Image (cartoon, rainbow, N blue to C red):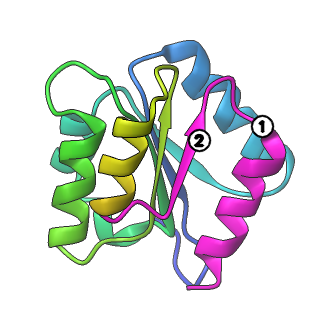
Amino acid sequence: MQSGKKTPIAIIDDDQFLLESLKDLFEATGIESRTYASADAFLDSGDMHHVNCILADVRMPGTSGLDLLSAVVRDGGPPVCIMTSFADNRTEAAARSSGAAAFLEKPLSSKDLMEFAASAAKR
């Protein structure tokens, strides 16, 4: 991990193309990010307290994004943005009531992603 205040954004999704696209987007703006193909891979990495924020998909094999959110909140981790292609009021309400800092529907807006990253960096 990088030392100092600039720490990476964790991007967690089982869609490899999305992981690479988001990593490229953040790198183009000078923001470091790390990618994980599953919530379990992220949790096993020990990186939770070494990132400014987490972008996590709702539906993934193994631990879901909402279960990851609960674990991060329980452990006092960084802000979490839940991303989904399957947005509905119930899922958004569950994410927000569980402590999500943001809820974004795919396809993702680069403006919304950058706003989330900027607000997380201020925390």
Between 102 and 72, which is closer to the camera in this rendering? Answer: 102
Magenta region: which residues? Answer: 99-123
Amino acid marked by disc 1: Ser
Instruction: Identify the residue at the far front of this view.
Output: 89
Residue 87: horizontal and vertical position, in percent? 49, 28
| Magenta stretch: includes residue 120 | yes
- Label 2 neighbour load within 10 Å: few <14, some 14-19, many 20+: many
Which residue lies at the image location 59% right of the left edge and 14% below the top edge?
A: 17
Secondary structure beneath disc 2? strand
Q: CA distance from mark 1 to mark 2?
A: 8 Å
Which residue lies at the image location 27% right of the left edge and 54% below the top edge?
A: 69
For residue 89, side relative to residue 73 (left or right): right
| Magenta stretch: includes residue 113 | yes
- For the N terminus, give its image quadrant: bottom left
Residue 100: horizontal and vertical position, in percent? 40, 60
User: Is the C-beta separation of discs 1 and 2 under 8 Å?
Assistant: yes
For residue 60, side relative to residue 51 (left or right): left
Label placed on residue 109? 1
